[in-house]
Image: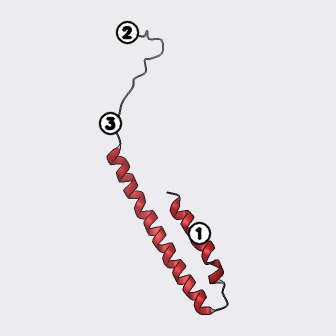
Amino acid sequence: MLAPPLLMLGTCAGLQRFVFSEDEEVAAGAMMFGAGALGLLWAFWLLAVPVMGLLLLLTRGRRLVIEQPAPGMKQPDA
């Protein structure tokens, strides 16, 4: 689950050179690309969380309750 935030930071770091370009069209294109890329990464990240939770619930095993004897009670002989 760390991939989307790292990709977001990488996108911001990679586009920095183009966003601060002196050519206005290059800067505008970089900002539009960055906004689209960040929007997709946020969407994938937010949609993956419920999917991962559903997979967790569907694949967990049965609950096993192990009872601990009360303090002072004698252990049964095996």
Task: Answer with mark 3 or mark 1, whichever residue precedes in sequence.
Answer: 1
Query: Looking at the rendered structure, which numbered label has been put on residue 23?
Result: none
Place of residue 23 in the rendered image (x, y in percent of width and height, measured from the top left): 64, 92
Q: Are marks 2 and 3 in contact (CB under 8 Å)?
A: no
What is the crowding at mark 2: few (fewer than 14 residues within 10 Å), some, or many (at least 20)? few
Disc 3/disc 1 C-alpha distance (Å): 41 Å
Q: Secondary structure at mark 3?
A: loop
Query: Residue at 39% of width from left, 52% of height from top?
Result: 53
Task: Answer with mark 1 or mark 2, whichever residue precedes in sequence.
Answer: 1
Place of residue 5 in the rendered image (x, y in percent of width and height, measured from the top left): 54, 63
Query: Residue at 48% of width from left, 74% of height from top?
Result: 39
Q: Is residue 33 left or right of residue 74?
A: right
Place of residue 66 in the rendered image (x, y in percent of width and height, measured from the top left): 39, 25
Q: Are marks 1 and 2 in contact (CB under 8 Å)?
A: no
Query: Residue at 36% of width from left, 31% of height from top?
Result: 64
Query: Looking at the rendered structure, which numbered label has been put on residue 62?
Result: 3
Query: In which image quadrant can residue 62 be found?
Result: top left
Name the image quarter holding the C terminus. top left
Disc 2/disc 3 C-alpha distance (Å): 26 Å
Query: In which image quadrant can residue 22 be found?
Result: bottom right
The disc labelled 2 sits on which kind of residue?
Answer: Ala
Q: Is residue 62 above or below residue 71?
A: below
Q: Secondary structure at mark 2?
A: loop
Query: Looking at the rendered structure, which numbered label has been put on residue 10?
Result: 1
Query: Looking at the rendered structure, which numbered label has been put on residue 78?
Result: 2
Front residue (pair 58, 74): 58
The disc labelled 3 sits on which kind of residue?
Answer: Arg
